[in-house]
Amino acid sequence: MKYLSEYRDPDLALKLLEEIKRTVTKPWKIMEVCGGQTHALVKNGILNVLPEKITMVHGPGCPVCVTPLHLIDKAIYLAEEKNVVLCSFGDMIRVPGSKKSLLEAKAQGADIRILYSPLEAVNIAKENPDKEVVFFAVGFETTAPANALSVLHADKLGLKNYAILSSHVLVPPAIEAIMSDEETMINGFLAAGHVCTIMGMEEYYPIAEKYKVPIVVTGFEPIDILQGILMVVKQLELGKAKVENQYARVVKEEGNINAKEVISQVFTVQDQLWRGIDIIPKSGLGVNQKFQGFDAEKKFPLTNLRAKENKECIAGLIMKGIKKPVECRHFGKKCKPQNPLGAPMVSSEGACAAYYNFSVIT
Amino acid sequence: MKNKQFNTQCPMPKFDFDIITLGHGSGGLLTNKLLDSGVFTILSNDELDKRHDGAILKIDGDIAFSTDSFVITPIFFPGGDIGELAVNGTVNDVAMCGAIPKYISLSFIVEEGLLMEEFWNILVSIKNACDKAGVLVVTGDTKVVDKGKGDKIFINTTGIGEVHPKAAIATKNINVGDKIIVSNQIATHGIAILSVREGLKFETTVESDTTNLNYSILKLLDKFGTDIHLFRDPTRGGLSSTLNEIARDTRTGIVLQERKIPVAVQVKAACEILGLDPLYTANEGVFIAIVAADIADEVVKTLSMLDNCKHATIIGEVVAEHPSKVVITNTMGGNRVVSMQVGEQLPRIC
């Protein structure tokens, strides 16, 4: 397939791998920020073939995994108790809430619909004027434009029965939080290509400068990942800390200006709770004052939901890169995709799911 | 993609009703009207025409017996409809036992409000699919449920067939070293259904590959007999789930070569866009054959001359290592386990 098979070329992969091996002299810890990259690393067996000196640390870039538990509970509550048509991306559906997942709530009769696009949710609202429709707007900067657009679209149509339950997180503050943590041993980053497609690269220069850490914006195919790793290692070996763009076929320096404009029309930056991690200052997007009529948090205020985390799940440690999924004593035993203790086991970008589904045979 | 010549022209007779209502399932006059002018007219054969509660049949030798229910949305999709699917599905399940399908039963659960025209079109499809596969509908049932208690129409079919005298199809006959053959390109049906269900449009329409596989199976059994160790059709759950079941049941390992697995380029592209894995996507007109290594090339050659098996390929083999596990060697040369799918494949965030 054109523009895809080239980036899965085994001969080129071997060449890149050889060059990585020739270049590396010291041990380095590199974090791939995005869960999509984690999956590419595991699915393609790259983790097994990298030289021992390179340790890949899996980052927090799984939007489903960091969505706060109380919001999942709230989504379920809205669907079950408030007669809301709750629309969501598929990834979110199996994530366990305090008592149940959206999938279980759906099976028990709640009107929960799995969609590919938030604009479909706006159509549902339009076609069902007697029902409240809420879209569970989860994601990094990547999905923010489409979710914002759904609000603008609903506003234009004059819909009063559409709202989004927003849990949007931002990558650069998360990288800052990781680097400012004294326990962090990360030497370099593969930044998430899709996020930078929207936002561009400018947010990353101050971080690379401040923490003296190389950041390479990287794609998601095996060749992208290997080339990204090579670019980080080259910088590290030379003592450099620059922002570079491996994913130049997609990512522009300035990002997607129209998409950024749409985001800024609807959202405002706010402090955000990352499930399993902590509140990270200015790391999330909430619906702004102008569009508060479309904010499910405001439309359906609810304060008495008591979310209770499962103490057996070490998702936070995994997302901060402190533990690997296989180091969890419940991995593959008590915790499996069909019976998950936490979100990383069921999200398509979760590190635990990557290790479980694509476990490696050597 | 499939044999389109088979198209019985069957104009709908005049009914004094446009939609099916609860009364059509009551067993009374309305039911008889529906059956007389519909089901019995179009599916007429000696056994069905007796209109008894059940059928009395003659079968030689061992009997293969299988049942399946069809609940697909939408009921009409590119490349087929629920009626054709209901016949092919059961015909293929019987054929996978190494048998020649002969008779099927046909039960409808209709949601009231179904257009008579749609019901008629489904009946025509059923008739065409039966003729093509050489099976007769010999008994059946029609029930109508309240609006909202079904999804337009559900169909159950049960089929019986004569086991081929040369067939020895059983997981216990699988040996280390056997080759795994897939009869055609995978994942086509799943993508065809998903693209209409989700309203996704591609440059070319992906059509379901639903087809009857009984003649392909018959040909292989006539020619290779007991050297064929297993047939399976990897429908729901896709190739990965079926192969995992085989690995589990035989306690052997299975190794697949990713670059050998045939997937149509537009299906592959759709999978990439939708974040789906062809290995987990549903098939209809595809079967897996596990055969003795020394006949594998011949089997592929025989299959590739048949219309509905043009892309038959050896995709892997049975090994002694990693018992009960399916492992795939990817295009990069790395190995990974292919696990069984947990539930539905779900659309991803990004």
Image (cartoon, rainbow, N blue to C red):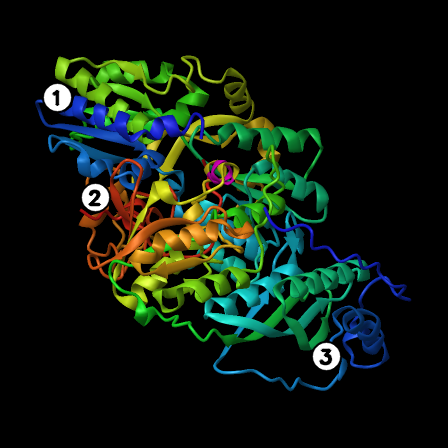
Quarter of the view holding residue A276 = top left
Q: Say what amino acid the circle numbered 1 marks.
A: Arg
Could you say where residue B183 lies in the image, as x and y percent from the top left?
45, 53
State the mark number for residue B48.
3
Q: Residue at x 25, y 44 (%)?
A: B335
The reply to the same-chain question for discs 2 and 1 is: yes
Q: Say what amino acid the circle numbered 3 marks.
A: Leu
Which residue is disc 2 drawn over?
A324
Q: CA distance from mark 2 to mark 1?
A: 27 Å
Which residue is disc 1 drawn over?
A22
Q: CA distance from mark 1 to mark 3?
A: 76 Å
Describe residue B135's horizontal placement relative to residue B22 as left or right. Answer: left
Q: Nearer the viewer, residue B42 or B330?
A: B42
Q: Say what amino acid the circle numbered 2 marks.
A: Lys
Describe residue B195's horizontal placement relative to residue B35 as left or right. Answer: left
Residue A306 in sight from this viewpoint: no
Residue B85 in sight from this viewpoint: yes
The reply to the same-chain question for discs 3 and 2 is: no
Residue B270 located within the stretch drawn in magenta:
yes
What secondary structure is found at the residue carrying circle 3? helix
Q: Nearer the viewer, residue A271 or B289?
A: B289
Camera-side mark, 1 or 3 = 3
Instruction: Output the chain of dot 2.
Output: A
